[in-house]
Image: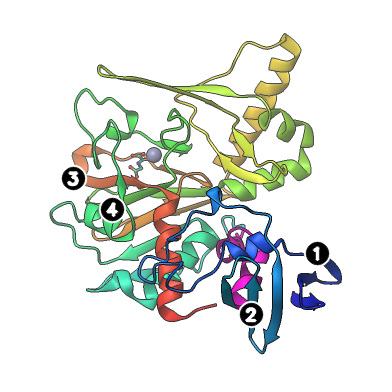
Amino acid sequence: MKIELINNKKVILDADGSKKEIHPFWLRERVSESEHLDPGTQQRLFDPATMNFKIDIDEAKIDGKYLNVKFNDGISSKYEIKKLSSEFAGIDNELDSIEKIQWDCNFKNIKNFEYKDGFFDTKEMYEMLISFYKYGFVIIKNIPTKNNFLIQFGNSIGSVKRTNFGEHFDVKSKPNPNDLAYTGLHLTPHTDNPYRNPLPPCIQILHCIENEVSGGYSTLVDGYTVSEMLKKVKPEYYNILSSVKVRFRFIDKDVVLESWSELIHLDQNKNFKSVRFSTRLDYVPILEKKELELYYEARKYLSDLYNSDKYRIEFKLMPGDLMMMDNHRLLHGRTAFNPNEGRRFLQGCYLDFDSTEGKLRHLKRKFGIN
Ligand code: OGA
Ligand code: ZN
């Protein structure tokens, strides 16, 4: 990506041979001198939405790494060409450039991270977040197990999202549970809270406080790997599962929550965006019998993939271990356990993606990482 000038009046962006003129007002909006842009907040001190956008460039010059522009409204500004280029590269290039790595049961060398004082502003935290974006989960060891520390953990990355279960929830077997998670039952791979509107929680944290039972292993499946596999081997299943919306529903004595979504949700370019899957909570709409036949066949196939040994990893969370996972990408579950064998106690909470994204950009800025 290069910047060129025509007659010192027009600024041209040359992206691999394709040349486009940059609108003068696009540059005018980006003047960064302190009388136009507050140096502390980096927020504008003028309002471009109210200005006349039919503006011209009186003179433009390239001076090494900088572009100098004099506009015909009397304002001049100096731009760092590298900064402009990064804006041309895409809306959110720094996060889009972290490639998702698909994994299955052969994913053995999981790098665990170790918590220590000051962790939240370290390079290690940065690496932890990169790992989270690549694989959809991370495990951090040695997290204090007293005083609901997971809330402090979540709030040091972003802001914990409160739900009808509270700021956090305690996963242990209890009498009259309002969710089967609060029993010793086996939980098949699922995503949490698919019934939330508009979206289920993005990031889920599960922190192990006690685990004295012989079962109760944690399981994870990469929904991205499975969806891409399904697309390859059974395109007709993939198509119906990514086009029919089903109703997810949660009820207890205080609330009835409902939301509609495809089991495999695609973005506008028909690429993978997220999965929702919870066979305790989904209701397929009434369709033509033939279509429903295909839907049920497809859902069974998908469920078999999610539940197969080929895609699942299984491990035991021990006291102090905290697992942070992408609830839009991964499915999680646990093997059954016998509550009479001893205590098993996990604490959970949710965060939005803007927490981890914001923290990651901050750490990149702090450590000068490109
Ligand atoms: C949950 C859940 C897993 C576990 O509470 O949503 O999936 O290991 N728990 O108990
Ligand atoms: Zn769950």
Q: Closer to the observer: label 3 or label 4?
A: 4
Foreground tag (1 vs 3): 1
Query: In this figure, which residue is indicated by the disc labeled 3?
Result: 342
Characterize the local packing of mark 3: few (<14), some (14-19) or many (20 or more) Cα atoms within 10 angstroms.
few
Label 1 neighbourhood size at 10 Å, few (<14), some (14-19), many (20+)?
Answer: few
Label 1 or label 3, whichever comes before in sequence order = 1
Residue 193, picture quadrant:
top left
Q: Residue furthest left?
A: 147
The residue nearer to you, when weighing 68 against 174, is: 68
Q: Which residues are magenta?
A: 79-101
- Which numbered disc flags the more N-terminal residue, 4 or 1? 1
Q: With 354 as the anchor, is 50 left or right in this view? A: right
User: How far apart are labels 2 and 1 at the CA level?
Assistant: 19 Å
Residue 19: which quarter of the image? bottom right
| Quadrant into which the N terminus falls | bottom right
Quadrant in which the C terminus appears: bottom right
The amino acid type found where label 4 is placed reads His
Tell me which numbered mark, 3 or 4, is placed earlier along the sequence. 4
Q: Amino acid at mark 1?
A: Lys
Does the magenta-highlighted stretch encompass residue 90? yes
Q: CA distance from mark 1 to mark 3?
A: 68 Å
Whether residue 216 is visible:
no
Question: Distance from label 3 to label 4 (Cα)?
Answer: 18 Å
Identify the residue under disc 4: 207
Q: Which mark is on residue 20?
A: 1
> Where 344 falls versus 241 (above or below)?
below
Residue 91 image position (x, y, % from top left): 61, 58
Identify the residue position indicated by label 2 in the image.
Answer: 68
Report the side of 177 relative to 16 (left or right).
Answer: left
Whether residue 169 is in magenta: the answer is no
